[in-house]
Amino acid sequence: MEIAILLYEGVTALDAIGPYEVLASMPDAKVHFVAKEPGIKTTHAGVPLLNADTAIADMPAPDILLIPGCPDPSYVAEDAEIIAWVKQAHETSKWTTSVCTGAIVLGAAGLLQGLSATTHWLAHEALKDYGATPTLQRVVREGKIITAAGVSSGIDMALTLAAAEYGDEIAQEIQLIIEYDPEPPFDTGSPAKAPVQMVEKLRAHFQ
Amino acid sequence: MEIAILLYEGVTALDAIGPYEVLASMPDAKVHFVAKEPGIKTTHAGVPLLNADTAIADMPAPDILLIPGCPDPSYVAEDAEIIAWVKQAHETSKWTTSVCTGAIVLGAAGLLQGLSATTHWLAHEALKDYGATPTLQRVVREGKIITAAGVSSGIDMALTLAAAEYGDEIAQEIQLIIEYDPEPPFDTGSPAKAPVQMVEKLRAHFQ
């Protein structure tokens, strides 16, 4: 099971590494971090943290394709080489997935036309530009395409994928090994649950 | 706020990157990934993924110290240079933290003597070797030392730290930005919740 996780300058690290930890634990999984050019990529917080070991040109047909997001993915969505690779990889993939605003990149590749999809709550409206119907769910599956909500939701997405591909028991074992029994100290993790003023403050800040 | 997250060959990526995503979002946070020697470190799954940008020798006094874990941390716990650095950094840190079996490294540095602490559920017994009392909680705070349970628990730990340092509202905003409203597809994320046979199977496999 060849897995390609896209990296690029400015990526949000947890978008990629949350699902990585689950997917790398699947039977026979071989994870590659891919980029236009291999090498160390700086996160959106400015840390030179994540290494791409493989060029996208050298991995045209992964079994699983994962596109992580970043605060403003427009420069990725407008990158012709990346978009061509996403389209090509999707043709033969078993699963095509995104976390957070990685869905915008899938949309720019034309993969979300007519489908329900999700993304970071701050980016929901942008999905409509690509013919998708934004859906306020944490994980949205449409055939072989799975989109996840913001940042941390990639863990839930990857466990859902592991269960669909290998069965519930394997996915449950992975969940137990990564001790994923979350206890957030607050109940403010979605715009539906956080105080309205907080939601509006962050919306204004990021727009 | 200078934050040092230790890396080493064989580290579990999500142990480091879960809390990183929270801590990097704190006001005035400056995150450094540190190692004995800077450069790319391979994860326990064999992927050359995480880059250490700073040598531990160049960061003797971080404000926040975070030690992530790996399946068998004994080679880290026996590394005299790393242990000396952990001891030194702890002397002046505001917070000294671990995720997963990173607690074993804190223990080897003598920091958990007489304290309650937690770690990955498979490693609880080992904490006793360092004079700590293993506690089946996801996040355990003892003064400025915070230990977290396995792998994914670092997100909860870091939100707890953010709240303690900056107040609930900042921590809640960070939780909303990373859309941390977890929906695990199963309820098998801790040994108390998973089927007994599954717990025993994994215990046998890893011992």
Image (cartoon, coloured by chain):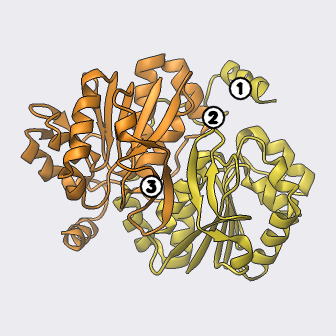
Chain colours: A orange, B yellow
Percent x, y for residue B106?
79, 61
For disc 3, the neighbor class at 10 Å (few under 14, some 14 to 19, many from 20) is many
Q: Quadrant of the C terminus of chain A?
A: bottom left
Q: Residue A13 carries which label?
A: 3
Could you tell me which chain the residue with mark 2 belongs to? A
**Residue linked to disc 2:** A177
Image depth: mark 1 or mark 3 in front: 3
* Type of amino acid under label 1: Leu
Dot 3 falls on a residue whose secondary structure is helix
**Residue linked to disc 1:** B202
- Vertical position of residue B201 compared to residue A49: above or below: above
Q: Are marks 1 and 3 on the same chain?
A: no
Q: Distance between the residues labelled 1 and 3?
A: 29 Å
Of residue A120 and residue B186, the one placed in the foreground of this image is A120
Q: Would residue B72 be found to the left or right of residue B198 on screen? A: right
Residue B90: quadrant of the picture: bottom right
Q: What residue is drawn where x is 63% and y is 22%?
A: B195
* Type of amino acid under label 2: Ile
Asked whether the residues under the numbered discs 1 and 3 touch, taking CB atoms below 8 Å apart as contact, a structural biologist would say: no
For disc 2, the neighbor class at 10 Å (few under 14, some 14 to 19, many from 20) is many
Image depth: mark 2 or mark 3 in front: 3
- Vertical position of residue A207 compared to residue A158: above or below: below
Percent x, y for residue B206?
76, 30
Q: Is residue B183 visible?
A: no
Q: Are marks 2 and 1 on the same chain?
A: no
Could you tell me which chain the residue with mark 3 belongs to? A
